[in-house]
Image (spheres, helix red, strand yellow):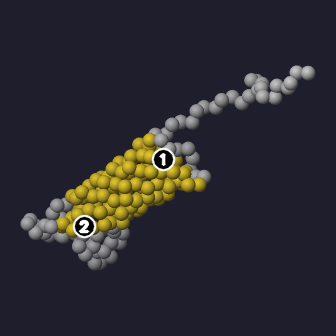
Amino acid sequence: MPSPAAGQVNPEAAPAPGPAAPSLKYTGYAGFAYTGLNQVNTSRYGLIGVKLSLTRNWGKYFGLTGAIDYNKPPIESASPGNPGDPSVYTVMAAPEVHANIYENLSGLFFGEVGAEHTGGEEMNPSTSFAGGFGGGLEYSLGSRFAVRAEGDIVGASFSFIGNTPPLSSTHRTWNGRGSIGLVYHF
């Protein structure tokens, strides 16, 4: 008796190969942002604004991010409020480590370096080298869209308001920041 051909597959009954999953190498992010205002003397309220970033992903776990954010209106405008008319923007680059935690939930960690500018005040200088670290959580809504919440802390050095050379020694400040927004993978 011939042995049964159990390991063979009928080509007519085999499932048709589906389209290959797209290779998503970039991640764009846009979100509502908040920053502390510790570099402005007697500031009482943090500022709100927007954060935009673009990440180039390499492999499953690593990426390189470029991010900008701009914050202008204060959280509250009660009197007394922040002195002057402050604004803060940063431009940062950050290596990133990201991984899936459970089903649609992923996490990310990053370390960042760049520049921070404080406007609307009499800072001298008004732009400083900055660096920090942070992380976040991302919930996938499908293959391309997700919702992300992230936070970081950024250190920079600014002079006290009204200082003029040669008295403009700087002091380091640390601002906590946070954002929540929409992610698009492409």
Q: Earlier in the sequence, mark 1 or mark 2?
A: 1
Residue 52 pos. (x, y %): 38, 51
The picture places residue 7, in percent across and down from the top left corner, at: 78, 28
Q: Is residue 56 above or below residue 149?
A: above
Task: Label 2: state its secondary structure.
Answer: strand
Q: Of all residues shown, which one is farthest toward the left?
A: 166
Locate residue 171, reporting x and y percent: 21, 68
Q: Give the residue furthest to the top.
A: 2
The residue under label 1 is 61
**Residue visible at 71% across and 30% down in the picture:** 15
Regarding mark 1 in the picture, which secondary structure is present there?
A: loop
Res 32 → quadrant: bottom left
Q: Nearer the viewer, mark 1 or mark 2?
A: 1
Q: Residue at x 22, y 59 (%)?
A: 128
Picture quarter with the N terminus: top right
Residue 172, which numbered label? 2
The residue at the point 51 percent across, 37 percent down is 23
Q: Is residue 122 visible?
A: no
Q: Quadrant of residue 121?
A: bottom left
Left or right? Give the position of 101 relative to 112.
Answer: right
- Left or right: 164 in relation to 185: left
How far apart, in angstroms, are the residues tagged by discs 1 and 2? 32 Å
Q: Is 162 left or right of 21, judged from the image as shown?
A: left
Q: Residue furthest right?
A: 1
Name the residue type under label 1.
Tyr
**Residue 52 sits above or below residue 121 on the image:** above
- The residue at the point 51 percent across, 51 percent down is 99
Q: Is residue 128 visible?
A: yes
